[in-house]
Amino acid sequence: MNANNLTQCLITLGALLILVKPLGAYMARIYEGEPTWLGKALGPVERLIYRLSGAGGREMNWKTYAVAFMLFNIVGLFVVYALQRLQYLLPLNPMGLGAVTPDSSFNTAVSFATNSNWQGYGGETTMSYLTQMAGLTVQNFVSAASGMAVLVAFIRGFSRKQAQTIGNFWVDLTRGTLYILLPLSVAVGLGIASQGVVQTFKPSVTVPFLQAAVDVNGAAVTTQTLAVGPAASQIAIKQLGTNGGGFFNVNSAHPFENPTPFSNFLQVLSILLIGASLCYTFGVLVKDRRQGWAILAAMFLLFIPLLWLEVAQEQRGNPLLAKIGVDQSASGLQPGGNMEGKETRHGIAQSAIWATATTAASNGSVNSMHDSFTPLGGLVPLFLMQLGEVVFGGVGSGLYGMLLFAVIAVFIAGLMVGRTPEYLGKKIEAYEIKMASLGILVPCAVVLIGTAVAVVSNAGLATIYNPGPHGFSEVLYAFSSAGNNNGSAFAGLGANNPFYNLMLGLAMFFARYWIAIPVLALGGSLAAKKAVPPSGGTLPTDTPLFVFFLIGTVLLVGALTFLPALALGPIVEHLMMVP
Amino acid sequence: MYLEQLIISARAVVVFTVLTGLAYPVLMTGAAQALFREQANGSLIVKNGKVAGSRLIGQPFDDPKFFWGRLSATGPVAYNGAASSGSNLGPLNPMLRKAVQDRIAALRSTDPGNPAPVPVDLVTSSGSGLDPHISPAAALYQSPRVARARGISEDSVRETVDRHTQGRFLGVLGEPTVNVLELNLALEAIKWDR
């Protein structure tokens, strides 16, 4: 880690910290239904949405809320599936792309509805502009807004007393989309468009090669076809909504998707922005801001050491290349380090910051190819996903995942002293622990069982790209990504085939809804409880002690579950690489 | 409850599709085309009234008189702007080692007197396969060869490299870069002037 790397890390984290409070406070006002100037300006649009969709503003109990959430997601999933299957008949397809295969369409539909945005396909060669806009961009917005809605409903479980209802899904969905995601997307979208991210409905552009090239068949190639499209609008929301599905195959490594260090900075900040700010929103909503800061502190304390490890490993480079006359030292003239799969303009620091951020948040977009990272450089993103996407995590889903760990943490602490545990004035009893455990254990099971099935079946082994332990890491990464709704990949694995499309599609589906529904059930059960005033035996949950207790709980579950699998992949590979 | 919520869901999907899937991208396209016309259409380089490439998308070079860019893993031709791709080779993959050795051999065969270790970005594949840049170190490494192949002084090549070197954003973010296509176009222009 050299001085410049450190400065780049500090600037990114510093900018994030500055924005947490203003955005967090604003989001709290939006979900509380308090007046804002944007609310005045866009109020008529909000009311129009309710009128056109027939959604009333009645409060819902948790079951109705969950039904609305599920049905809306499933209808959206069918629309994305149908758009892909029928895109060859529909307008806005200037490249004349054909129907997407059924298994790939299923995978992509689940992927975008669940906020995973795993990309089994190459964007520019597969999806028409209409599919990208009306299918994928829409799900980028509403899957993110759905996650935030579930979070807010869950938080109401703590802030309400002896209540039967936890809010109205349609109101939370609409307000999150209209007042939070859309305005931020417009700002970020124009910011990155100014840097060179394309935004056009024209078909691809053809330009001459300065020096004629020869393709693999020996034929001369004198022109270059540049895929373009309405990219900036989609990329803005893909980052802000922790979606991550790119417009182009290589995602934000593509120069038209992420052309400059400034566009990179804006995007990496957008990845973490809402997830981190929601911690402050949480503090406001439970009327105790220190609770929000405590959760945010736990996230930062998990994030920073892993970020350091990531930058240091990638900057150290590949010892095998040093032996054959390659200069990997960092200087004012070159980034050095492990540059395979990285872009020159991003170098080591911005690639490593991105890889850590995109897997801490369940974003999954990439600006470099994780498959080509050093073994421990690849372990960091893998481990961050396996921790359950709770370090910032997906918008909404990251914080409700972390709050499940907080519930488990107060429960464990309660067991130690033999008292009924409480969190934020609500008694934590058997039902709450059952729901929290379910939410934490389902993704673990999905990841490990999915990986195990893949590596003992011919279909699963057939499309592994890299030999040795790295090949195992590719499969483990795929299921860690899908089983935690991240969406990034060790992209060497050939995953666009019926086996992986189906397996990973199911993994994403279970991982999303088998957490979200227990979370809503938990919210409903907590809302119905009386508030217990804190007593001398109450464990305070806004202290450094609790922060470390929470971090310990997250690490304990993650490490115990996944260390054996990690040992077979990146850890063995690291030992093979280091002389 | 189920039927009522299902009907609302169907109507809401249509409403949100119109709002976020049509109105939003169309308005953004209008705004980007009005405010950042050049960038929104692919940052094309225009020389003498003709499009000569994109400032953001690299091109393949292997002639000694041109600066070479990053390795590109796109198929069927390197720097295929219609199908971006990285190599996805793991750090221990023998194919990675071979690709690096082949590139070093190619660089050395066109520049036999240069024993310096090769800057890493010049022997590795970019993430996109379309990287328009190399590091200043990679450009300086190639300068003697380019000068010799073009029969011009090394100083004038280095001076052209300097003019096409961009520092870090605000002196801090990202890495210093040299745009390979723009540099090569500038070198071609020098030839025209003479």
Image (cartoon, helix red, strand yellow):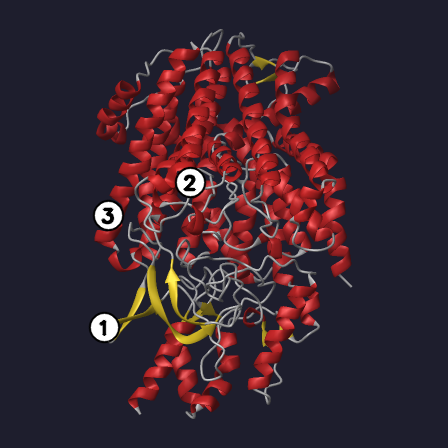
How dense is the environment of label 3, judged by Cα within 10 Å: few (below 14), some, or many (20 and up)?
some
Where is residue A519 shown, x and y percent of the image? 55, 21
Q: Residue at x 72, y 40 (%)?
A: A457
How dense is the environment of label 1, judged by Cα within 10 Å: few (below 14), some, or many (20 and up)?
few
B83 displayed left or right of B188: right
- Closer to the eye: label 3 or 2: 3
Which is more toward the observer, A184 or A502? A502
How many angstroms separate mark 1 from mark 2 (CA)? Answer: 39 Å
Question: Which residue lies under the disc numbered 3?
Answer: B31
Quarter of the image where the C terminus of chain A is located: bottom right
Quarter of the image where the N terminus of chain A is located: bottom right
Q: Is residue B149 visible?
A: yes
Q: Amino acid at mark 2?
A: Leu
Tag 2 subunit? A
Q: Amino acid at mark 1?
A: Gly
Tag 1 subunit? B
Q: Residue at x 48, y 74 (%)?
A: B136
User: With respect to residue A84, does B72 lie above or below?
Assistant: below
Which is more toward the observer, B133 or A421? B133
How many angstroms separate mark 3 from mark 2 (CA)? Answer: 20 Å
Question: Which residue lies under the disc numbered 1?
Answer: B49
Tag 3 subunit? B
Dividing the picture into quadrants, the one containing residue A45 is top left
Q: Is residue A287 visible?
A: no
How many angstroms separate mark 3 from mark 1 (CA)? Answer: 26 Å
Q: Residue at x 25, y 57 (%)?
A: B37
* Callouts 1 and 2 close, C-beta under 8 Å: no
